Amino acid sequence: MSEKSIVREARDIQLAMELISLGARLQMLESETQLSRGRLIKLYKELRGSPPPKGMLPFSTDWFMTWEQNIHSSMFCNAWQFLLKTGLCSGVDAVIKAYRLYLEQCPQQESGPLLALTRAWTLVRFVESGMLELSRCNCCGGNFITHAHQPAGSFACSLCQPPSRAVKRRKLIRETADINPQLLDEQVKQAV
């Protein structure tokens, strides 16, 4: 019996270390592992050299609806649902692998990725609870995050109909990924 608990604890520590390295907040660590808060804080300090950030997690679906955040959230959510549907992984493993795919596809800003791991995890919880869902754009056919129960055929994504401020905000920079595109299938195999 105690061997199982030692193995479980070792798995939880390994999972917590991976989540911390990806930028998870303490609330996510507490929810996804069975380690005590004190041990998680110690582990966080040991890995990051500072205590975990304090404060509550945001609990609003509105963040995911603004144009740029919606595009990033939709990319992550599509990867997450693909991994679930193919049966390659489930639970927090699917969240981690989908997040790694997201990081590979989206160039990071100086301040870090636009969609943080804890925010992506919160998105998964919103989708699983039915507060948010993926809706098909009636222009391009892509699937994007929307509030639940969006009327079918009425949604146009922010790529097809960008807000006027989106074009003025920054000029597009030609990225290496634009020059050498990689297939999603290859990246999924690498992530799994």
Image (cartoon, helix red, strand yellow):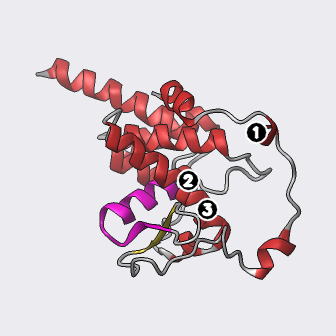
- CA gap between label 2 and label 1 equals 15 Å
Disc 3/disc 1 C-alpha distance (Å): 17 Å
Residue 132 in the magenta stretch? The answer is yes
Is 32 left, or right, of 5 in this rendering? right
Residue 41, percent from left and from top: 48, 43
Query: Looking at this view, is 34 or 132 the one in front?
Result: 132
Q: Name the residue under label 2.
A: 75
- Image quadrant where residue 71 sits: bottom right
Q: In the image, is residue 99 above or below residue 156?
A: above
Q: Which amino acid does label 3 sit on?
A: Ile
- In percent of width and height, residue 101 lies at 56, 39
Left or right: residue 142 versus residue 124 is right
Local secondary structure at mark 2 = helix
Q: Do the residues labelled 3 and 2 touch (CB within 8 Å)?
A: yes
Depicted 161 relative to depicted 134: above or below: below
Q: What residue type is labelled 2?
A: Met
In this rendering, is residue 107 above or below 77? above
Q: Does the magenta stretch include residue 95?
A: no
Q: Which residue lies under the disc numbered 3? A: 71
- Which mark is drawn over residue 177? 1
Can residue 115 be seen?
yes
Residue at x 60%, y 56% (from the top left corner) = 115
Where is residue 169 drawn, in percent x and y? 84, 71
Does the image show residue 25?
no
In front here: 12 or 141? Answer: 141
**Residue 82 vs residue 112: left or right?**
left
Q: How crowded is mark 1: few (under 14 residues within 10 Å), some or many (20 or more)?
A: few
Could you tell which of marks 2 and 1 lies nearer the N-terminus? 2
Q: Mark 3 vs mark 1: which is more N-terminal?
A: 3
Q: Residue at x 71, y 75 (%)?
A: 162
